[in-house]
């Protein structure tokens, strides 16, 4: 796979409505999984993006969504981004990944089945103190 150098201020980096920029320090994994489900529901696809150490988190999110039958992989892009390191005072190259996932045909059925099972389990818990 070819690596390309991308400048951080490039227009391709502009925020899109269906883009999630993942950090492995700010939010738990399933926050991003649930957010990606919501974006797929609203926009029919989601773009997951990460730099450096957060790349493994993006790949995990994508695999969870694919393995549960909610998403299909449309595109995977890898690149290198030059970022200014304040402590070293120079530009450091960081790996970047972008994964675009699309909605599967059974997405809506799976989502409504999950809502039904979540309600059933909460009703059972209410009955058993």
Image (cartoon, helix red, strand yellow):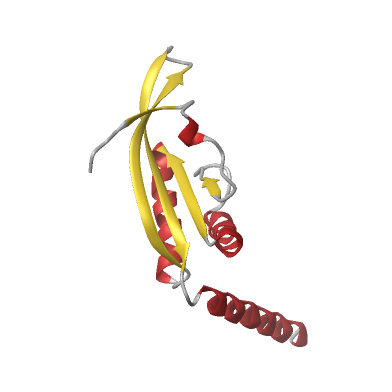
In the image, residue 121 above or below residue 95: below
Of residues 116 and 40, the one drawn nearer to the viewer in this rendering: 40
Instruction: Give the residue furthest to the left.
Output: 1
Residue at image coords 49%, 77%: 106
Q: Residue at x 40, y 37 (%)?
A: 52
The structure residue drawn at horizontal position 41% and vertical position 46%, both measured from the top left corner, is 98
Q: Quadrant of residue 14?
A: top right
Give the side of residue 84 with respect to residue 127, left or right: left
Q: Where is residue 124 shown, x and y percent of the image? A: 70, 86
Q: Is residue 61 above or below residue 89?
A: below
Q: What's the residue at 39%, 18% (across, down)?
A: 91
- Residue farthest toward the top in the current orientation of the protein: 89
Q: Is residue 97 left or right of residue 41?
A: left
The quarter in which the N terminus is drawn is: top left
Picture coordinates of residue 44 (x, y %)? 53, 62
Point out residue 97 in the picture as x, y percentages from the top left corner.
Answer: 38, 43
Quarter of the image for the C terminus: give it.
bottom right
- Residue 109, image x, y percentages: 55, 80
């Amino acid at each position: 796979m070819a690596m390309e150098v991308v400048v951080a201020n490039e227009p391709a980096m502009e925020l899109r409505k269906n883009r999630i920029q993942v950090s492995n320090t700010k939010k738990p994994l399933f926050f991003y999984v649930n957010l990606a489900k919501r974006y797929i529901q609203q926009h029919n696809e989601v773009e997951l993006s990460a730099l450096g150490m957060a790349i493994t988190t993006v790949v995990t999110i994508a695999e969870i969504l694919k393995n549960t039958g909610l998403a299909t992989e449309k595109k995977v892009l890898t690149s290198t981004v030059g970022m200014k390191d304040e402590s070293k005072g120079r530009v450091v190259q960081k790996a970047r990944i972008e994964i675009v996932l699309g909605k599967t045909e059974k997405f809506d059925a799976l989502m409504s089945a999950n809502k039904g099972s979540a309600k059933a389990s909460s009703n059972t818990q209410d009955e058993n103190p």
